[in-house]
Amino acid sequence: MNPFRALHRRERGEAAVLEMMFVIGLLLLPTVIGLAQVPRWIDARSTAELAAQEAVRQMVLAPDEATGRAAAEAMARQIVVNHGWPESALLGVEFSGTLVRGGEVTAHVTVEFPAIVVPPIGEFGGGMARTWSHTERVEDFREF
């Protein structure tokens, strides 16, 4: 038996193992990065939902609409910042409904967050903007 032929077979086997490791790595890396983003997306959603709830609460407790809008926007901005997002992540707070006894007011909060974040490298994919809403009823015995 030729000793060089056995050596050549062993090198081919090692190359196949290395190729398999690279292919598996290339398949698993995007999957792992995608799964690592799920908690961030959930955090963005819960932040925006809380901001909408508190914004509409500030609006229905305010003495008038102008004061309510200012307090609601300040509250939503504070919630976004307190949850670790940049202040610029809050794109807007809008309201629908009427501020009258027994009426309903809905707050629509739009938050932008990066699509993919790889910690040592940075953000990829641009920003994803999502809007969440919350509705609250104005008390029936409320004075304006």
Image (cartoon, helix red, strand yellow):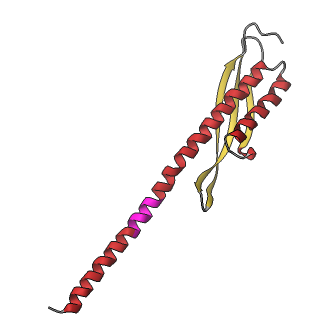
> Is 78 in the magenta?
no
* 37 w.r.t. 76: above or below: below
Q: Is residue 144 left or right of residue 9?
A: right
> Is 28 in the magenta?
yes
Residue drawn at (48%, 58%) of the image: 30
Q: Quadrant of residue 94?
A: top right
State the quadrant of the N terminus.
Answer: bottom left
Q: Is residue 68 left or right of residue 89?
A: right
* 119 w.r.t. 65: above or below: below
* 26 w.r.t. 38: above or below: below
Residue stretch in magenta:
22-29
Q: Quadrant of residue 26?
A: bottom left
Q: Is residue 120 left or right of residue 63?
A: left
Can residue 98 be seen from the camera position used here? no
* Magenta residues, dominant SS class: helix
Q: Pinpoint residue 95: horizontal percent, then vertical percent.
A: 74, 28
State the quadrant of the C terminus.
Answer: top right
